[in-house]
Every structure is written in structure tokens, then in C-alpha cells.
Amino acid sequence: MSDPQLRARLDDLEGRYAFLDDLAQELEQLVTAQAGEIAQLQLELRRLRETLEAVRPDLPDATPEPPPPHY
């Protein structure tokens, strides 16, 4: 392979590597942000469950009524 061809291939590979490196950094930032959002949502869900459990005794009985006799 001639020197200009080799140089062109090397330049192409360097460009692709730079693009992939940037993409990997962007994906890492995205995953980190999503992990934070998931942690926040889990905390909020835990608080909602605790609130529901706290007010559940005050709720009327949730058992369904039996169907009318004509069923």
C-alpha cells in the first residue's frame, strides 16, 4: 500500500475514533443523568407508598360489593 493511501486510511480512522470518543462521552453523560432521574423517581415512589400506607386506614373499606341477586 502506498504512503498516500496509508495516510488517507489513517486520517479516516482518526476521524472515526474522534467521533466515537465524542459519542461515548455523550452517552456517558446521558446515562449518568438518567441514573439520577431514576433515583429521584424511586425516592418519590417510596414516599408516595409511605403516604398511601399512612392514609389507608382512613379510607373506606375497599372490598367490592357482591353482585345483585339477579346475576
Image (spheres, rainbow, N blue to C red):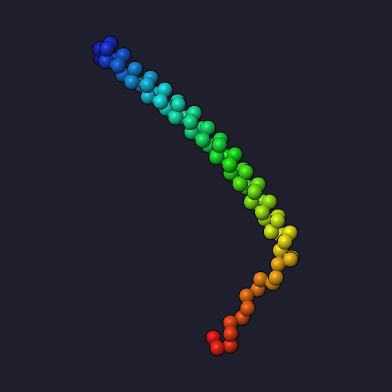
In the picture, which quadrant includes the C terminus? bottom right
Where, by quadrant of the figure, is residue 67 drawn? Answer: bottom right
Residue at horizontal 73%, vertical 59%?
A: 54
Give the total of numbered labels.
0
The percent coordinates of residue 21 (x first, y second) are: 45, 25
In the picture, which quadrant includes the N terminus? top left
Q: Is residue 33 above or below residue 67?
A: above
- Outermost residue on the bottom side: it is 70
Residue at horizontal 61%, vertical 46%?
A: 41
The percent coordinates of residue 70 (x first, y second) are: 55, 88
Nearer the observer, 31 or 60: 60
Q: Is residue 61 above or below residue 29?
A: below
Residue at horizontal 53%, vertical 37%?
A: 31
The percent coordinates of residue 2 (x first, y second) are: 25, 12
- Outermost residue on the left side: it is 2
Q: Is residue 3 above or below residue 67?
A: above
The percent coordinates of residue 9 (x first, y second) are: 31, 19
- Outermost residue on the top side: it is 3
Residue at horizontal 58%, vertical 44%?
A: 38
Nearer the observer, 4 or 57: 57
Q: Is residue 6 above or below residue 35?
A: above
